[in-house]
Amino acid sequence: MPFHRIEDPARLQALVGAMLQIGEDVELSDLLTHFVEEATRLAGARFGAIGVLDPSHRRLVEFVTVGADDGLRASIGELPTGKGILGHLIDHPEPLRLVDLRDHPASGGFPTGHPPMRTFLGVPVSIRGEVFGNLYLCDKEDGAEFTQEDEDLVAAFGIAAGLVIDKARLHQRLRELTLVEERERIARNLHDTVIQQLFAAGLRLQGVVGSATRAEVDERVAEVIDDLDETIRQIRTTIFGISPRRADGGRGLRSEILSLTDQVGVRMGLDVRVDLRGPVDTQVDEETAEHLVAALREALSNVVRHAGAVRVEVRVVATDRIVELTVVDDGRGIDPRRAGVGSGLANLRERAKLLHGGCRVEPAPEGGTELVWWAAVGPDGGTGDRGDGR
């Protein structure tokens, strides 16, 4: 580590401040730009840049510059890919200080429109022996050469840049791993439920062949069609389980719902069935989605604590006017006299009221409890009218 040779307190303080930003949730390009700006300023250079290598470590795939305005960048043309002095640093990842970079054997001159540059300082961007690119400074403003302390300072920024690039690539690998795990989950769901249901539907259709009357045939075909409709809904729910992230980096509503129901199912041993219909991710705004997920969490919590249920059905339906959440369990049912009592149910109703919606809890037709929670969506905020007379 070159830190111990840096004696200037201002340089040390700036370096420590840059290091502290590594743990913050900041975009990689913003951090790299900040590191180049600080290294360029503290070393007194006119120009600075970080070149990031591709995985093969043979060419530059990203080039972050400081000191050149938009007009100068446009006159230079395409960004460098790793030839000349820059290519030499790729092949020899070690600090390089030059009084006049034009005199170096690897120098290939400058492209048309490039400003003249003389003094040069380049250091590898690396961590734990792995090189991710190089950090370059050109033209010390006072006309002097770059010093050993300049080199030590810039080398420390190179280590910091290596840390953030390594962190970013690790997160990318983790995201890819998560995607693979989600695909495996989808495959399991398709095999365990959907494919078995399709197989059962096929067997039932085969049985129709031996039916004695047209009425029996019609009845069985109608039943199979209903089963296939349900299977198609499950396929859609499963496929949409991997939702694209929102522009702010958050997960879509489908993903939030499936994640919550998966957690409850695994941890509590419940058989949780989910049915998502309509434009759940695109029609429901972020505030309403947060309230809906909170309502679902409260409803599932009530099932776990009070219902003694084995199976729970969760349905979310989104239209251009409302989004409706229904949670039905097969537990011991709710006492009608207690249906409006309790802080949990009060919270559910208050959330719905804020969104021009409502909430009701009552015994399910086939036993257990049915909770229905709805909220208005759409550009006008809606009126909370569900359109079904309730």
Image: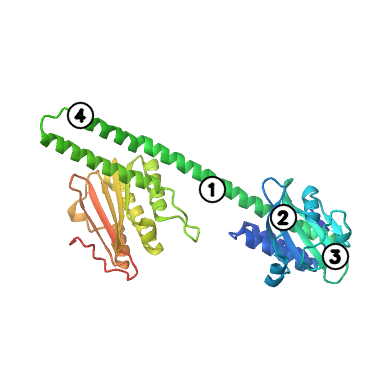
Cα gap from disc 4 to disc 2, whole angstroms: 68 Å
Name the secondary structure under disc 2: loop
Q: Which colour scheme is used?
A: rainbow
What label sits on residue 207 in the rendered view?
A: 4
Q: Which mark is residue 81?
A: 2
**Neighbours of disc 2 within 10 Å: few (<14), some (14-19), many (20+):** some
Give the mark, 1 or 2, whose residue is nearer the N terminus: 2
Q: How far apart are marks 1 and 4 (CA)?
A: 47 Å
Residue that mark 3 sits on: 118
The secondary structure type at the circle numbered 3 is loop
Q: Which amino acid does label 3 sit on?
A: Arg
Q: Quadrant location of the C terminus?
A: bottom left
Dot 4 falls on a residue whose secondary structure is helix
Task: Give the quarter of the image for residue 7.
Answer: bottom right
Q: Which of 268 and 76 is in front in this view?
A: 76
Q: What amino acid is at disc 1?
A: Arg
